[in-house]
Amino acid sequence: MSVVPESGTESGTPWSVTSWQARTAAQSAKYGDPHELARTVEEIGALPPLVTSWEIEELKAQLARAARGDAFVLQGGDCAESFDACRSEPIAAMLKILLQMSLVLVHGTRKSVVRIGRIAGQYAKPRSADSETRGDVTLPAYRGDLINRDAFTPQDREPDPRLMLRAYERAGLTLNFIRALTEGGFADLHHPEYWDLSFTKDSVYAAEYRKIVDSIRDSLDFVSAITGVEAEALRRVDVYTSHEALALPYEQAQTRKVPRRPGHYNLSTHFPWIGMRTAQLDGAHVEFHRGIVNPLGIKIGPAMTTDWLRGLLDVLDPERTPGRITLIHRMGAGQVEARLPALVEAVRAAGRTVLWVCDPMHGNTETTPSGVKTRRFDKIIDELEQSFVLHEQLGSRLGGVHIELTGENVTECLGGSGGLVEADLERAYKSRVDPRLNYEQALEIALRISRHLRS
């Protein structure tokens, strides 16, 4: 890949959009044709950006507010997006549940909610093994639609650089539809058809949700009647995008300087994050991310040490920029109490203000005796509640939640008010990678968080 290097970060060590290529890139795909890869990166780099620098800067400012306790972050979406899911119905359903959850959280916290979707770019996934064996056949692991294809054939499992171009196109279509919905009144509380509970109308939480919606709608009507002014600002919302920046050639392709702003922006997403499997201090992913201006998420699990975390903060945020770093902890319900406090104390001892977010999903993944990957709702709730309490005890603040969810009526996670059991998993298990909360379970999460923060 040939992109002209442009130096410069505050750390003093030379950085360019290609400097990561001199480092080891964990979880990277092995492409057979490097020339085709280079041509694809160059082609994507010449296309219009998916997001804008001013949107990125606005999100950074909102994340800084959340770190100070003046806002709450809701980050949610698919574990791994599929090109096939780039259709109006699932996109609208995803947006709808994020809006409904954020409405509940606004009501409970009396604070603004920053909505970040795991969407329009979450097409690649890290894998625990490079290959998959079925019977006597061993092939490369499926790494998401951006890298290769799910079908178990040699041709489908071969990493294909042209899929990055397909990912860009699908992300652009998704973003265009989201913007059309949010600008066109989809978030308007005066349109009850957008806020109905759909198949969850018989949920035990339906009445509580409707009461919240009616209360907010009545308040808006009252203000409008008294002032004679329609609250146009409340008829639309901002929704930002995020994905794990795993496939560095794809991220590099959309990274550039923009007019009248210093630094390089990764314009494939507003909010990229680094996973634990690619957070090596001397690795390619940390090298790439240290040079971009975007706000960054860092996933931290039970294996994260205080020295490792301090090192990441020093490399990725040497200037201690407000809103730059979000730490997304995912310990598992059984390890929160043992693992989280030391990390919180280390960040505080370093004099840093970061945004803490809880991901209660990834640390609570398990496999049923029949071999189906799932998560238990009670463990998800347990990790969330423990995290809130521990942050409070440590003089810290949990400022957001990161959830894998879908707006569809899937049956992938056990429990919740619907009482899903293992036999239900066969009914509507659609995820290709990790299990997601369905519509009803996601709304229940929001109501539980709202109650906690209100109390």
Image: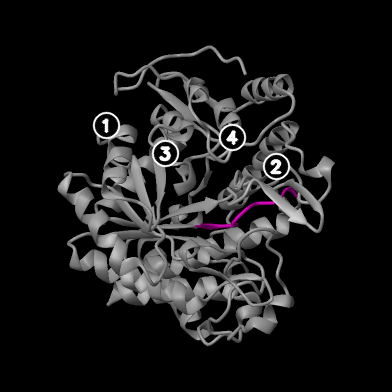
Quarter of the image where the N terminus is located = top right
Looking at the rendered image, the disc whose residue lies closer to the viewer, 1 or 2, is 1
Mark 3 or 2, closer to the camera? 3
Amino acid at pointer 4: Leu
Badge 3 or badge 4: first in the primary sequence: 4
Of labels 2 and 4, earlier in sequence is 4
* Residue range corresponding to the magenta coloring: 76-83
Q: How far apart are labels 3 and 1 at the CA level?
A: 17 Å
Q: Is residue 446 magenta?
A: no
Residue 318: give its label: 1
Residue at the top extreme, as displayed = 4
Asked whether disc 1 touches disc 4, contact meaning CB atoms under 8 Å apart, the reply is: no
Real-space CA distance between mark 3 and mark 2, rounded to the nearest whole angstrom? 30 Å
Q: Secondary structure at mark 1?
A: loop
Q: Position of residue 114 (x, y in %)?
A: 41, 54
Can you give x and y, in whole percent of width and height, for residue 139 in the image? 76, 46
Comparing labels 3 and 1, the label whose residue is closer to the camera: 3
* Circle 3 Cα neighbour tier, 10 Å, few/some/many (<14 / 14–19 / ≥20): some
- Specify the label residue 170 is tagged with: 2
Q: In this figure, which residue is indicated by the disc labeled 4?
A: 50
